[in-house]
Image (cartoon, rainbow, N blue to C red):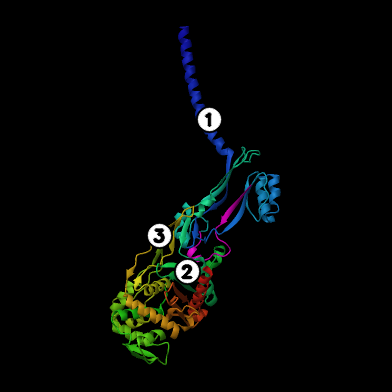
Amino acid sequence: MHKRAVASFVAILALFGGLMLRIYYLTGQSLRQAAEQQAGMVVTVANSRGTIYDCRLRPLVNTGEELRVSVTANPQAISALAGCIDSTSLGKLTERLREGKPAVSAVDSLPSPAKGLNIFKTPVRYGERLLAPHVVGYMDGDGINGATGAELVFDELLKECSGKATVKYTVDAIGKPLEGIAPIVSDTLKNAKAGVALTIDKDIQDIAETAAKTHMTKGAVVVMKPKTGSISAMVSLPDFQPSTLAKSLDNPDSPLINRALSNYNCGSVYKIVTACAAIESGVSLNTQYGCSGNVTIGDVTFHCHNRLGHGTLAMRDAFAQSCNPYFIRLAQRVGGQRLYNISAALGFDRPIFLAEGWKTARAVMPSELELMSPAAVGNLAFGQGTLMATPMHIAQLVGAVINGGELVRPTIVKGVLDADGVLEEYPVSPVQKVFSEKTANILEEMMIYAVNSGTGLSARPFNGGAGGKTGTAETGWVVDSKTVMQGWFAGFYPSESPEYVIVVLAEDTEGTNGKAAPVFKQICEELAMLKKAQK
């Protein structure tokens, strides 16, 4: 009896013992995890985001560096910072340290090494002047996601290329770093050297921005390499800077809009298309029409910019003098359907995709039904009426002339880089034959003649020659009792073996005194100097 009682007692004791061990193990593990979490405090000193490069792999963002420190309430560390930080920032830092917690701050100069002080060189996303702001874009208010431009289009890629600088401190129960235990430092900021390379060339972008701001207050510039469609520069005025974004939101001139990708009335630069349609239709360059200053089609009278008239002209001189009545009669001969077909083939009925997720406004063409009206054909002949297109569409058009009638889609992406700087280039867009090489050669010669002896004379550079077409488009808008007019110059440089297509739009030329031709001329001349400097 006694033995059975002892055995039962031992069994019960063993059962309770096992239960206590199990409880201890479970609670001990959770307490241990809590203790580990409480014992370590991670402080983020800086974050970095993938870099946006130009075509020569020069950074457009992350161009500057900032010194940042993580510091504990150590007298030596505070003393080392005293001469490296302004008084206001030092006061905020000291207030944080009084709580016993580590603090992070930017510093103006490199402090002396000290106990409790960790120093990092961190990238600055945007410098004092961001080149190509409409192309690069900007971040959202939280600084986490891209909001416009390349920052938005390549947001996921740039996030994947992110880095971080952190310091993990061993702390006591109240979160105060323990002296004598070195923190664990992690720095992956260099990961942000990976990113995306654009076709933008910093030197050419700077040239285009400077020229545009010299002669315009509102407008756009596109500089493109015709053979590949690579956009070397894209300018929109007025522009903005990320540091003063709030001011731009309230600006009535809408500086956040990228005018290079926005629709405008085309005016006489569209005569390139009308001439192309006529030549492709077999109309002789010797075809003559008289200009008395106006022409009436049906019950609509169209005026020439030369109200006294040009007299009798053949196509080459009519193009050089930008004679509206000549091209209206030429379009009547070609017909609305042929004009529509070649315009559509040249992309005037759709947007242009510069990259996946990055496109222009959709160009607007009069419908085939509308073009059954002779007056509508007359309007289209010199780029008026319902026709609207972006400066990028006009650049694509001029590029087709240079490329022997082959349409090359403009692009703004060169490829992607890894953290080691290895570039994976994107393939060049396929080309589409739109008109004959013979027609292209004739148009090219006509554009050179227009610069040398026609309305484009003020755009002629000192050296190298150029080809181009002027344009002044009536918008139908009236501001302060003045009709809003858009000024264009679309051309190529140099005249022999052209390397660049350059399109300039001066928005509201009457109201802003903006001039497109001088911008073109200045860009050409500075491109020539740049080429010499790079040899």
Please say if the residues under marks 2 and 1 sit with CB atoms less than 8 Å apart. Answer: no
Q: Position of residue 299 (x, y in %)?
A: 32, 88
Which mark is on residue 234?
A: 2
Q: Position of residue 292 (x, y in %)?
A: 38, 92
Q: Residue at x 57, y 38 (%)?
A: 38
* Residue 314 included in the magenta stretch of the image: no
| C-alpha distance separating marks 3 and 1 | 56 Å
As shown in the figure, which amino acid type bears the numbered disc 3? Tyr
Residue 337 visible: yes
Which mark is on residue 289?
A: none
Which mark is on residue 426?
A: 3
The local secondary structure at tag 3 comes to: loop
- 277, 460: nearer the viewer: 460
* Residue 128 included in the magenta stretch of the image: yes
The local secondary structure at tag 1 comes to: helix
- Which label's residue is closer to the chain start, 2 or 3? 2
> Which range of residues does the magenta coloring cover?
118-139
As shown in the figure, which amino acid type bears the numbered disc 1? Gly
Q: How crowded is the residue under tag 1: few (<14 C-alpha within 10 Å), some, or many (20+)?
A: few
As shown in the figure, which amino acid type bears the numbered disc 2? Met
Residue holding disc 1: 28
- 269, 99: nearer the viewer: 269
Q: In the image, which is nearer the foreground, mark 3 or mark 1?
A: 3
